[in-house]
Image (tube, helix red, strand yellow):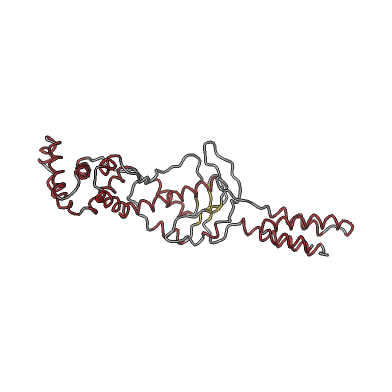
Amino acid sequence: MLNNRRITALALTAATAAAALSVPSAGATTVGEPKDGVCTFTMNAAEKDFVSSLPRTLSPGPVQDVQHWLDAFETAFPQTQPISQEFLDLFQGSYVEVFNNDLENNIDRWTQRYVAAGIDEPAARWYFVQLWNSKALSDHTGMDMTAFWADVDKAMTSGEIAGLTGQEPYQKFELTTNKKVTDAQSAMSKAQKDKWVAAYKASQGVIDADRVAKFRDGFIDARDTCANGGGAVLLPTDGANPDADKVATITPTSTAPTQNGGPKNTHKEVSISVSTTVNKADSASKNTQAQSGSSTGAVIGIVVALLVILGGGAAAAFAMGG
């Protein structure tokens, strides 16, 4: 029969293994327990490299997305570029007034130049209007991302991150098709539409916007994790994140109260209380011989429970052997 000392040793071994499941690995991306709404914040090298490679000139608004479609159009149909350059060189000084005084006819006149170059009319008209707008409208700008990048730089420099206390604080990158783009594409031939869409998806601007969007979402997840007690997050990397296997079993380090209107913890993780189990095992080892029967049964129950958590087969073998 197993004596109390051996039972206690088994309990401690099982408890230690359980603790390994709930304590963040030193190499994993971690968010510490919040103190006054702020948590320690550690990124791995691959995640830092990813952030360093991101362009900071992109904005998430619809204006930026229209620019992506405009750039993709010029890539898909390079024959438009000489015509466009001619217009941009001409649209200055007195010609601006001349153009605006007969706006509809001038838009149609330039549109037909693109049609003559082999572009379907609806797409040619959309493209030229956007080109003209980019030159004529001074407020043709996207949404500001200054606050986002300031928060990122502060977190990376200080090693601390603030938990969220309300709604998501940064604009989303939503690469959705503008209605005027959709209307133009619906009247295009399939061949030209497919060529334009393919150029859009492959454009560096869209690829960069997608990368920034992924990091933005990961950074918000880190702030949400801080507000909900700390734990581990996976920020995007080029290729597989080296900490992916480590983070999968990590649980929050504590449970923080939900702020009014703030984020709620959506992580579905199981936490094991190691200290309680160890204390019970230590207490059992100090019982007298007269109490050994009941103490042994209690400790075996603890060990089996832990082994069930760690693996059903090990628990069954232990129960039969005992």
Q: Is residue 9 above or below residue 253?
A: below
Q: Is residue 265 left or right of residue 294?
A: left
Q: Is residue 321 above or below residue 254?
A: below
Image quadrant in which you'd find residue 307: bottom right
Q: Nearer the viewer, residue 176 or 279?
A: 176
Q: Nearer the viewer, residue 286 or 109?
A: 109
**Count of labels in the image:** 0
Q: Which residue does the image show at 22% across and 52% down from the upper left?
A: 74
If the image is split into quadrants, where does the N terminus sit? Answer: bottom right
Image quadrant in which you'd find residue 176: top left
Q: Position of residue 145 (x, y in %)?
A: 37, 46
Q: Is residue 141 above or below residue 211?
A: above
Q: Is residue 320 left or right of residue 96?
A: right
Image quadrant in which you'd find residue 170: top left
If the image is split into quadrants, where does the C terminus sit? Answer: bottom right
Q: Position of residue 56 (x, y in %)?
A: 35, 52
Q: Which residue does the image show at 24% across and 50% down from the upper left?
A: 192
Q: Position of residue 42 (x, y in %)?
A: 50, 56
Q: Residue furthest top?
A: 101
Q: Residue furthest front?
A: 190
Q: Is residue 170 left or right of residue 254?
A: left
Q: Position of residue 58 (x, y in %)?
A: 33, 49
